[in-house]
Image: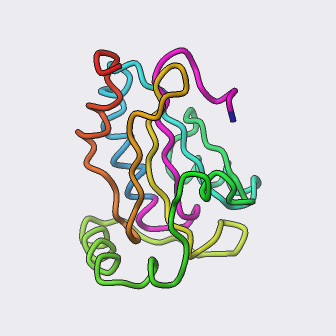
């Protein structure tokens, strides 16, 4: 994974699975602030856990063809980051509230097939500064629980090294 990092800040956005309504909403949120991340000198990398053949479909469907998207079907990086997995993370009041809000905004779940990733795996965000220093680590409590973009942008800023 070391070859993913560059001389500046790297933002790793871990996704539940490639069909997930919340992950798609999270990608849209991140991309809506891409200019701010670029100004902060940050590189954005999305990491799913489905089969690699699903990456191109996801990139095209989300309109992020030039973005870096990788996958870890072994879930080793998800486990190393302490991201939650399990039924109670998937089905809880927080998840229901977040999914309802996403649905109202117009986000939609795509048809799920197991090649898209593990349904009960949660994601999060990790910001890595030069020297492989973890500057920010957000663990999603449930579906749709994502950090405030301004917090991630602040932690990504070169001046915040």
Q: Position of residue 35 (x, y in %)?
A: 33, 26
Does the stretch in magenta take in 21?
A: yes
Residue 144 image-quadrant placement: bottom left
Q: Residue at x 29, y 76 (%)?
A: 94
Could you tell me which quadrant the N terminus lies in?
A: top right
Quadrant assignment for the C terminus: top left
Residue 111 horizontal/vertical position (percent): 58, 75
Q: Position of residue 6 (x, y in %)?
A: 57, 20
Residue 109 versus residue 3: which sits nearer the camera?
3
- Which residue range is magenta in the image? 2-23
What's the residue at 46%, 79% (across, down)?
90
- Indicate whether 22 appears above or below 133: below
Residue 44 lies in the magenta stretch: no
- Residue in the image at 48% along x and 34% along y: 44
Q: Is residue 34 left or right of residue 148?
A: right
Residue at screen point 40% across, 62% down: 140
Left or right of residue 151, residue 118 in this image: right
Q: Is residue 20 above or below residue 15?
A: below
């Amino acid at each position: 994974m070391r070859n993913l990092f560059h001389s500046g800040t790297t933002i790793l956005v871990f996704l539940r699975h490639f069909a997930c309504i919340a992950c798609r909403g999270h990608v849209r949120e991140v991309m809506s602030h891409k200019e701010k991340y670029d100004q902060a000198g940050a590189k954005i990398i999305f990491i799913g856990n489905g089969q690699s053949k699903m990456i191109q479909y996801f990139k095209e469907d989300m309109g992020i063809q030039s973005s870096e998207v990788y996958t870890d079907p072994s879930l080793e990086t998800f486990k190393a980051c302490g991201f939650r997995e399990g039924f109670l993370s998937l089905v809880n009041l927080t998840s229901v509230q977040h999914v309802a809000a996403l649905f109202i905004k117009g986000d939609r779940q795509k048809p799920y097939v197991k090649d898209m990733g593990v349904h009960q795996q949660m994601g999060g965000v990790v910001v890595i500064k030069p020297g492989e220093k973890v500057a920010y680590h957000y663990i999603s409590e449930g579906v749709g629980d994502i950090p405030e973009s301004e917090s991630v942008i602040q932690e990504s800023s070169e001046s915040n090294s």
